[in-house]
Image (spheres, helix red, strand yellow):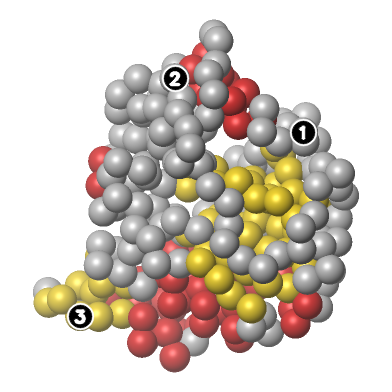
Amino acid sequence: MSVTSPQTDWYSADWPAPPRVRTLITTRNGGVSAAPYNSLNLGLHVGDDETRVLANRALVAAQLPGEPAWLNQTHSTTVVEAGPFGAPPDADASFSHASGQVCVVMTADCLPVLFAERNGRAVGAAHAGWRGLCNGVLEAGIATMGVAPADLMAWLGPAIGPDAFEVGAEVRQAFIARDPASQAAFSPIGDDKYLADIYLLARQRLEAAGISAIYGGGQCTVIDRDRYFSYRRDGCTGRMASLIWIEP
């Protein structure tokens, strides 16, 4: 299947990373998938036609120095050094110290977090759904990169916003059990339900881990239906990608 030029609403992380650190954030636009995956679905696991997904991945790869190190994301805290892989490993974060190796995570409401060493010698990407975030996927990614947290910066990509992320009391309690300060990220809405601010929860975890340079956040994949896939909103839907690499 032929592919076309990328959409202009793909974008890069807005942060003061070194010039050799490059990023790409895809949206739902610019691909070849049919509804309900329209149009740039990058997930092979959501029921879309495989030929179309591979064509979409080729569109993205054409903007990169190499093939992304795709992961089989399982809401874990497993971190791996980015590929090339024979098959996608079960992991929810990756890192690289090598130029040209692309780290990538897919999301459709979960929070993508990109990491870069201030000197541009290491990068990483983490997929932080509420379970992974609560259980420590960000801390695991930081620890595995082999860089002092004070030398890292982080960027929070598009995720479900604080006005749309409704959770039960068990989710709130799981976070508070690990960090009492996290109660500030939950607003009660009645019937033992809460609105959760995943951006604040991530910032709290990153700051506690020693990272003070935190950027991004403030978007909502649920509300911005023209730009983003949202599993919470649509159920059957596609996946975007957040990618980071060191320029060769």
Residue shown at 26% from the left, 72% from the top: 195
Q: Position of residue 2 (x, y in %)?
A: 55, 10
Q: Is residue 47 left or right of residue 134?
A: left
Q: Position of residue 37 (x, y in %)?
A: 36, 28
| Visible residue check, residue 97 | yes
Split into 4 quadrants, where in the image is the C terminus?
top right
Q: Given the image, on which type of amino acid does mark 1 rest?
A: Gly
Mark 3 neighbour density, 10 Å: few (under 14) some (14–19) many (20 or more): some
Q: Given the image, on which type of amino acid does mark 3 rest?
A: Pro
| Label placed on residue 32 | 2
Q: CA distance from mark 3 to mark 2?
A: 41 Å
Is there CB contact under 8 Å for labels 3 and 2? no
Closer to the camera in the image, 67 or 191 = 67
Q: CA distance from mark 2 to mark 1?
A: 21 Å
Q: Position of residue 113 (x, y in %)?
A: 58, 61
Label 3 residue SS: strand
Q: Given the image, on which type of amino acid does mark 2 rest?
A: Val
| Visible residue check, residue 144 | no
Q: Which residue is mark 3?
A: 188
Split into 4 quadrants, where in the image is the N terminus?
top right
**Extreme top residue here?**
1
Choose mark 3 or mark 1, whichever is in front.
1
**Extreme bottom residue here?**
180
Quarter of the image holding residue 164? bottom left
Residue shown at 48% from the left, 37% from the top: 8
Q: Which residue is mark 1?
A: 66
State whether residue 213 is above or below residue 123.
Answer: below
Label 1 residue SS: loop
Q: CA distance from mark 3 to mark 1?
A: 46 Å
Q: Is residue 81 left or right of residue 244?
A: right
Q: Position of residue 41 (x, y in %)?
A: 45, 31
Choose mark 3 or mark 2, whichever is in front.
2
